[in-house]
Image (cartoon, helix red, strand yellow):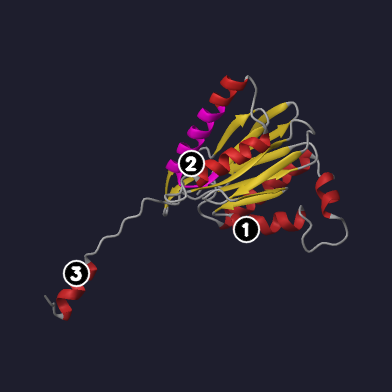
Amino acid sequence: MSFDSDTQRKIVSHQRTWSPYVDNGGTVLALAGRDYAIVAADTRLSVGFSIPSRNFTKIVQLTDQAVLASAGMGADRQYLHKILRSRLEIYRYQHQKEMSLGAIAQLLSNTLYSRRFFPIYAFNVLGGIDANTGEGFVFGYDAIGSFEKVKVVCSGSGQTLVQPVLDQQLAGRQKYDVPDDQRMASLSLAEAIELTRDVFNSAAERDILTGDALELYAVTASGVRCERFELRRD
């Protein structure tokens, strides 16, 4: 059967596409110092140019020494956080202790990789401190579980705005006056919190998917402290 050109154009114009994924925007960040880790995220949930929620958390506290933040699709993010918390609860019940930061990092990688053929649409940053040494570490992930242990990482819609600043100010990229390890070691927790607020305020000015409020979790040997700061609302 053949169609004339007008009929073909009408058929094409009425085709419908559907995707199981939607990017709800937002920015997540994690950085680590000598004896602390910071995990932060904004609270805006976007769908295109609409803002269904201005108070949607992207962070979950997994243990007293580990915090996870996830950018991407809101529904997949909530599903992933629920799965991880349930598995950590089972581990706690079976072993009568909390899972270590390194083990949680591997658990998250395995969970994401197990769904590699229909990925969980969430881009994660995990931060915490080592229970033995008290040193802070963070991990950055892609959607199928590949991860890297680093000192600073950012993901989400504001990544291209925030990550270059973090690389230059904290990781020592393009700077040669102070070695990288000394730069991170000399950054106090208060200075790290102030820098995190600054980069999120800057991102909110340029990225319409980032804004409203900043949730910031500071992980230290004494536990996890949560703070909230207002960002641009538009």
The disc, 2 or 1, on the residue closer to the chain's N-terminal end is 2
**Region of the chain picked out in magenta, as a range:** 70-88
Query: What is the CA distance from the residue labelled 2 to the residue labelled 1?
Result: 22 Å
Q: Is residue 5 one of those drawn in magenta?
A: no
Image spot of residue 33 (x, y percent): 77, 42
Q: Quadrant of residue 94?
A: top right
The nearer-to-camera label among 3 and 1 is: 3
Numbered marks: total? 3
Please give left or right for residue 124 compared with residue 153 in the image.
left
Residue that mark 1 sits on: 161
Report the amino acid beneath label 1: Leu
The residue wearing badge 2 is: 77
Q: Position of residue 208 (x, y in %)?
A: 51, 54
Report if residue 60 is visible in the image: yes
* Residue 125 position in % (x across, y down): 61, 45
Residue of label 3 = 11
Q: Amino acid at mark 3?
A: Ile
